[in-house]
Amino acid sequence: MIKAIKIVLVLLVFTCEIVNINAQVVISTPTLGFTQACASTDFNTYNVSFSFSPENALSSSNRFILELSDASGSFDNAIEVYSSSPGSIVSSPANISFALPQDVGGENYKVRVKSTSPAATSSNSQEFAAYYKSQDSPFSINNLIDTGVFCPNGSYLLTIDNPGGPLNDSPLNYPNLTFNWYKETSNTSAVFVASGESLLVEEEGTYFVETNYGSCTSDSFSNRVTISEASNSNEFEISSSLGNPFCASDGMTTLSAINGEQYQWFKDGVLIPNATNQTFETDGSGTYSVNVNLGECSADATIELEASGFNATIDTEEFVVLEEDENIWVTVTTDALNPEFKWTLNGEPILDEVSEFIEISQTGVYSVEITQTQNCNATKQFQFTVMEAFPDVDAIPNLISPNSDGVNDTWIIPLQYTTGTNTLVQILDPVGKLVFETNDYQNNWPLEPIEFKEVNPVYYYIITPTGQSSRKGTITIIK
């Protein structure tokens, strides 16, 4: 009897082991806790839930694994993106979280769940877009130059700028990324043109490029560049790497031209020797221009470069007339940070004047120096001349005595011909040589002493008002 009981117990144990060995588990299709996976360095956590049955079919060593397909939805080279600890998931339904690998990018990814003990595999999940946005900030193309020019029947090459810098986190530094180029059709719409790191433009228009993150929204896009054909426009813009105005104490700024075959840079209209590259470095203010040979044609550009680091204006002309018993106010307007002001009269400091405005009651040569004392230590200066009001004479005099006695020292003509009227005033010496010419006469000739002995020299004048006939006559110089 006892022997029979032992045999029965052995059979029961053996039967249980057979049942456990042959146990199976069924895993449901994973349910996504998201509609698309748009990962970045700031966020990369996504949830998936699934069910399995029966719960008691799992061994204590079982692990659940989440696999990610390739961009086409194939699991031939599946990537394991999650694995549970042995025996850690024992109840159904289960929720797990995973992170996207940094090289994913496509619209048709899927996931599936697998168990290890017993081995089982779920059906594939629904498709979803998945992108890891390794670069998600604006970047530059065409050296941040907003324009480009190509010759008739030619083309213009747009490229993504590389290497990057503080103002350009170039997406070319991320090898797995791809790019889509677009052409604007309106202020709010654009059409896809091509893919790649560069674009050969053969049609006029405004172009830009975006990093290809598919249906995921992104801030990884370039500046706009307007391309024109040289027959319609042969001008473009020059960019300054430190801006304009720039702070010279920060070092050299780089001026950049559009793409071309040959370059020649100029400053203030004078050719700069050996300045024949697409870029030119400088730390000085001035009018910079460049001629770009595009092959079958050429293009030019000019930039008024300011090395002050700030903007400033003054509300007065270069020459100011001060009427008798009159005071005038002059004011400087500036965006300089924590500015200091130094005013001078005839080269001497006006010690009590340290603000942005001054009240003027006497004639002379004034100047003001504005210094930015914060961030960029830069200086800018303005100069202007305050003169006495011209006498209001009716006739053009033909006799003057420039002997510095304060009476009839200069040739005073009617106000209708003086500064501000754009009248051409010319004076010729006794032998007919032009010695003075201006479109802004200030009743101040002669500018220098005229030396003579006994014979009083006779000069000749020609006064030509704008759009009128000239008036001519003589000026006799006496002591």
Image (cartoon, rainbow, N blue to C red):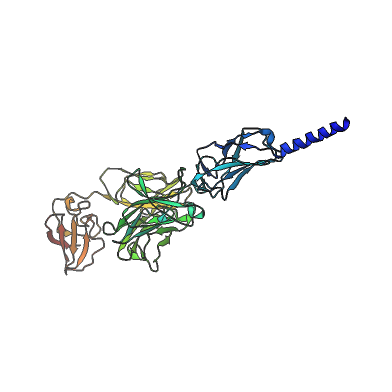
- Quarter of the picture containing the C terminus is bottom left
Q: Which of 230 and 55 is in front in this view?
A: 55
- Outermost residue toward the top in this view: 1
Q: Nearer the viewer, residue 421 or 232?
A: 232
| Residue occupying the point 63% across, 32% down | 92
| Residue occupying the point 40% across, 62% down | 278
Judge left or right: residue 377 versus residue 19: left
Q: In this view, does 53 lie above or below 198?
A: above
Q: Is residue 74 above or below residue 429?
A: above
- Residue 419 visible in the picture: yes
| Residue occupying the point 78% across, 33% down | 12
- Quarter of the picture containing the N terminus is top right
Q: Residue 63, image x and y in percent?
A: 67, 41
- Residue 366 visible in the picture: no
Q: Residue 282, image x and y in percent?
A: 42, 60
Q: Residue 238, image x and y in percent?
A: 37, 56
Q: How many labels does the image show?
A: 0
Q: Nearer the viewer, residue 388 or 189?
A: 189
Q: In this view, does 37 lie above or below 140?
A: above
Judge left or right: residue 97 versus residue 329: right
Q: Nearer the viewer, residue 14 or 239?
A: 14
Q: Residue 93, image x and y in percent?
A: 61, 32
